Image (cartoon, coloured by chain):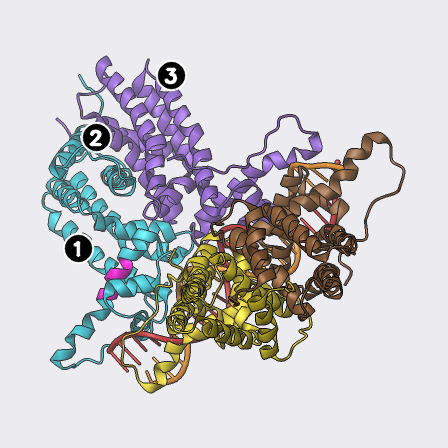
Chain colours: A brown, B yellow, C cyan, D purple, E orange, F red
Amino acid sequence: MSPASHSKKPKPAPLPRWRRRSEARPEEILDAALASFTERGFEAARMEDIAKAAGISKAAIYLYFPSKMAVLEALIEAKVAPLAMRAQELAAAGMADPLMALRMLATAAAHRMADPKVLAVPRLVISISGRFPEIADYYRTHVVTKARAALESLIDAGKAKGVIRDVDTKAATRAFIGPFFFEAMWTHVLRGETALGDPQKLVEQQFDILLNGLERRA
Amino acid sequence: MSPASHSKKPKPAPLPRWRRRSEARPEEILDAALASFTERGFEAARMEDIAKAAGISKAAIYLYFPSKMAVLEALIEAKVAPLAMRAQELAAAGMADPLMALRMLATAAAHRMADPKVLAVPRLVISISGRFPEIADYYRTHVVTKARAALESLIDAGKAKGVIRDVDTKAATRAFIGPFFFEAMWTHVLRGETALGDPQKLVEQQFDILLNGLERRA
Amino acid sequence: MSPASHSKKPKPAPLPRWRRRSEARPEEILDAALASFTERGFEAARMEDIAKAAGISKAAIYLYFPSKMAVLEALIEAKVAPLAMRAQELAAAGMADPLMALRMLATAAAHRMADPKVLAVPRLVISISGRFPEIADYYRTHVVTKARAALESLIDAGKAKGVIRDVDTKAATRAFIGPFFFEAMWTHVLRGETALGDPQKLVEQQFDILLNGLERRA
Amino acid sequence: MSPASHSKKPKPAPLPRWRRRSEARPEEILDAALASFTERGFEAARMEDIAKAAGISKAAIYLYFPSKMAVLEALIEAKVAPLAMRAQELAAAGMADPLMALRMLATAAAHRMADPKVLAVPRLVISISGRFPEIADYYRTHVVTKARAALESLIDAGKAKGVIRDVDTKAATRAFIGPFFFEAMWTHVLRGETALGDPQKLVEQQFDILLNGLERRA
DNA sequence: TATGAATGAGTCTTCATTCAT
DNA sequence: AATGAATGAAGACTCATTCAT
């Protein structure tokens, strides 16, 4: 799938300065849409609300996107693009000291997770995956797969360097991502109380187990 | 919250065999609804489709549930009740050998996860949590919290017995649940290929890391 | 129109004593229907409510009447029949002393008006007259026209006897009925406070004006 | 009660001529609604019909009124407002010669009664009074009570001036209104034949009795 | 570019009526 | 005679989308 097949992406190139504002419109719409979609779900979100949140009229959305579905697609695409790139950069940068890199990654993730908006897109993807499987595919291919790949390369590097045991790489990836993913869902989706206002603590605890395991050894 | 306020469940006790049918109706409807809700989302699911899937007319649903929302609530409640109980039983049964109990729990979970329907309710809860936070609360309170509690008691038991290191219990719980949850999402929601047709393998790999950690030690 | 063309009027004549009860059914239904129709209007009244009020099941109504409309027709017919007869009796009985007869009629009317149910049928007729003009016609022909005729014959008798001035008979009829009709609407339909708990007082006041006029004469 | 809570009446002041249309809409809708409600009753009237009669689409009604009920309320309110005012004006104007004023009032009423539409609102109120008593209250308070008050002040003025006998004022009011109200119902609701194409004749006859009474005096 | 007005295509929900027992 | 279960048809209301300006 290629989300964002909305045919009217209006960028005729050189526009006078005083029209810059309207160039920002699509993004404003997308932000408003993300908020609405997350809060009420794709179906229940009303174009009118999105418009209001974006500060324009309902009809104006159609100047930028041909349909509600197109807004969704553009939204996913827009929010996804940066992520894939960052994952690869981080992986590359961390080759020298993979354990340290993982720890930094986890710290960064824990900090970002404090912001509920970070989960917005994944939640949205989960909630519409039944109805629009192509979007799930798109998200998997462009985000999750790449993130996993980045992590796997770090882990493999760690194994090569001898600082990581000879574990199953995919399993190690799951072990790394899983707890954070779960905590995020717990906090922001299920609205459970986080034991830890301090993300740093979350990372430490998780890494303690991740690196040393649970079992008491002699 | 008490989801499932469908007021008309008629059970006057001893009905002739050939009328039993109507007693089964609510459950049939709930099953059909779960399928529809998961596949298309709560909003997009049409009562007509649910009815058709349950083999009755649209209007007949309203003999058993006063509204679409009530169907949703009844659904959550019905699917949740058994879970909470099982969690506590398992925990109790495993006090003697907590590590073994955890391993068995993981194995059971891995096996059940092969069935996409197992994720149906959690997915549904995630997808409507924005719109109906009370349902998220209900699910957290009645399912996730109890499952966590059961796991925590096992882990604490392990620590008491000296077979588990002195780790943060909540973190250990996350480390236990997270990877499975993540793998389930990957497979059934994001439709990613599972490397492992064999759930047993998944458990082993995950436990290898969980118990022994990642770090190579001297 | 012939209201009450419901084909299944079930009266096969000689029924065992223990079935008497079911013979009363049609009337109970009609009473319940009148209450419902008056309270909520013909359209808004639900067969289910009528049934409940009559102490039977919804389906049972259809054993006696083929449709909701038929219930309405039977109802009007049933409530109307006695009235026409009484009007003529009263008129006949009053020929000897018409003024006294009118006064007695008014007194009787005033007393009955204390009971809101008396207005039930007229209200019903008014409220459905737009939709079912035949019913309005039926009511006019069988009730109002006959009542007017009875009054007119009394007034004519009074004129013949010389106790009533040579006024327009129809106008006199209006002058007689109008104030009571208006007061009834005011009290029971518009829910206005009656100045008079005492119907007798209403009659006296009205007759004072009716007989003596408003104008002060020398 | 404050019927007519339709929140979206858009009047941002100076609109181009060719858009005035939309300003007239609410009234057009109300007129169409009154016709439909009177003809078929509130429940039986379909929004689609009202829309068609107003020359717009069903959905368009909802641009101006949030619900069918709101249309009803707005309707009552709109039709009621002018009446109350007029009653008071007339009363005030007639203080000098109350008998003449009453006669003129009656004449005006008789003429207006020739138009079936004049009864539309009262009929509507009667037909829904069971279901929506607040509307009956509203109508009583804002129309009937005021009209009565106006008449009563005229009658009291007549008594003060010595041109009207010392009768019960409320009774005199009923005697004045009643016959016209009854005749209107007879003609337009019960579809009875009016003896009088000539409203003037109706007034004369009625006043003959009203002023001089029925009884023959020596 | 921008929008207020308008609508067609739905969806939930209700209810008179029928059916099987 | 009686009823619980079931349904077809209909109606209020919503909303993505289009149109006129």
Residue assigned mark 3:
D93
Of the two numbered discs 2 and 3 on the same chain, state the one appearing first in sequence: 3
Task: Give the dominant element type of the magenta stretch: helix, strand or loop.
Answer: helix
Q: Quadrant of residue C156?
A: top left
User: x, y (%) of residue A46?
Assistant: 61, 49
Q: Does residue C73 show up?
A: no
**Between tags 3 and 1, which lies in front?**
3
The answer to whether residue C174 is left or right of residue B144 is left
Residue interval drawn in magenta: C28-34
User: x, y (%) of residue C77?
Assistant: 28, 62
* Subunit of label 2: D
Residue assigned mark 2:
D171
Which amino acid type corresponds to the residue marked 3 in the rendered image?
Ala
- Answer yes or no: do the residues labelled 1 and 2 have beta carbons within 8 Å? no
- As displayed, is residue A141 above or below residue C199? below
* Subunit of label 3: D
User: x, y (%) of residue A84?
Assistant: 75, 55
Q: Is residue C31 magenta?
A: yes
- As displayed, is residue D59 above or below residue B57? above
Q: Does residue C113 show up?
A: yes
Q: Secondary structure at mark 2?
A: helix
Which amino acid type corresponds to the residue marked 2 in the rendered image?
Ala
The single residue placed furthest to the right in the displayed view is A14
